Image: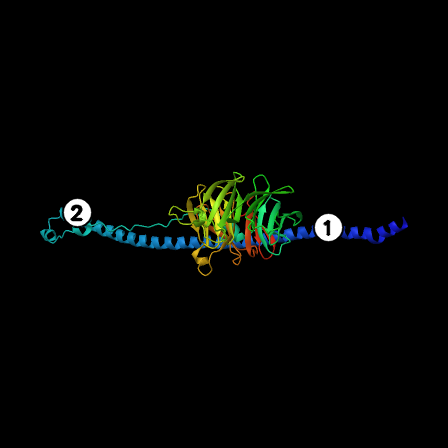
Amino acid sequence: MQKDLQDFGKFIYPKHQEVATMIRVQKTDVTKHSQKMKTALDKQGEALHIEIDTIIQGMKSDIDDMDAQHIATIDRQEDAINRTITEMTQVIQDLKRLLDTNDICLITEYTSRTEEFGSLPAQFQVTLPTFTPQEINRVQIHQHVGLLSKDVQTEYEELECVSCLSDSELWTCGDDNILRLYNLQGELLRAVQTKSGNKPQDIAVTQSGDLVYIDWYDGSINLVSGTQIQTLITLWGWRPLGLCSTSSGDILVIMTRDDDDDDDDDDDVAQTKVVRYSGSTETQSIQWDDQDEALYSNSGFPKFLSENRNLDICVADGVANAVVVVSAAGKLRFRYTGLPTITTREPFTPYGITTDSKCNILIAHGLWHHCIHIIDLDDNFLCFIDSCGIQFPKGLCVDSRDNLFVAEYASRKVKKLQSYK
């Protein structure tokens, strides 16, 4: 009892007091940090208000200048017509006097001026300016204000993919053979080794909340449910490059032909395709456009895909330097190849891809550009996300609130960016 009392007094109790003190310090730090961010937001808001007020005032000044020019021109026309009317009034009075006079000399000296005044002066047409208010784009506003971000540190040397299990839990994969589930506080909730011991190529969370992953080395698509791993599909002669889960519960897999395959069947000409699976049954294959040209590059370079909310299938094809978007029926809708002003020096090399609740498509612009492209469902560019300290973005996903999660390849962090809606 005396020893226990000594242990409590010298070690155990003081350590707990230290932890309690640290907790109080953390609470204070959280409050201070929140206030610091709010102050920064206020400052940014004031700067934006000043900029907007300056732009509005400048446009008002332009309107005043145009107004002054128009009024000056109208004043000149008004002065001219008033002088003509005054002169015409005098002519009318002179005519009346002549009609009442008997002075033949005045009458013979009269000269008609009707032709002089008969032509009306050219009327000045005022071309008034118009103002067309632009629709307020909250994405662009957020781009200027900035986005709140939060980092989740992982244990990989190179982080490659992220997929949302929920708004607070994230499945990840990287350069080893372990699939890891983290919460937003960075706590490791689960760690699952792949069935074959190989590194997974890509991951996705199904509608039922299970995890699927592809194994490039053995050509398999696998389902992680609880503690069990089930091989759903094994490809023969093909290598899976990327996958996603659809709103209907299907799985889309983009795959390339295995160079080692020596069979002579007709499929040898089809090098890359997207295949839809319902369970383990193939229900659709997408390879060609309407001109029988390949939709996707014939390469084993990683490709990422996502189903949009309008059921379009969006593939980030880094070798083709394009995002290829087809309809649910497999018809080519468009290819997004980046913005010419941005990608003329450096090729557009898309990596991770995801879509949000408004059918916008978000694309990681290669590992070295540190930005995200956002386009709408019809190939219209909306904006870049190139702030918030994004570094080497590779995998992307969004949660139910359109918060964006970015798997940063080199930093090994998942960066959460607050919804830009």
Element under disc 2: helix
Q: CA distance from mark 2 to mark 1?
A: 106 Å
Tell me, yes or no, whether the two marked residues, 2 and 1, touch with CB atoms within 8 Å. no
Residue under label 2, please give it: 96
Give the label, 2 or 1, closer to the camera. 1
Whether residue 88 is visible, yes or no, is yes
Front in this rendered view, residue 180 or 77? 180
Q: Is residue 234 left or right of residue 103?
A: right
In this rendered view, identify the residue nearer to me: 154 or 320.
320
Residue 118 in the image: state x and y as whole percent: 19, 49
Q: Residue at 43% of width from left, 53% of height from top?
A: 59
Q: Residues within 10 Å of mark 1 (few under 14, many from 20)?
A: few
Q: Position of residue 172 (x, y in %)?
A: 60, 49
Say whether residue 90 is left or right of residue 227: left
Local SS, label 1: helix
x then y, percent, for residue 292: 39, 47
Report the front residue among 78 and 336: 336
The location of residue 103, given as percent across then percent down, is 11, 51
Q: Amino acid at mark 1?
A: Ile
237 horizontally vs 34: left or right: left
**Amino acid marked by disc 2:** Lys
Does residue 417 appear in the picture of this structure?
A: no
Query: Circle 1 is placed at which residue position?
Result: 23
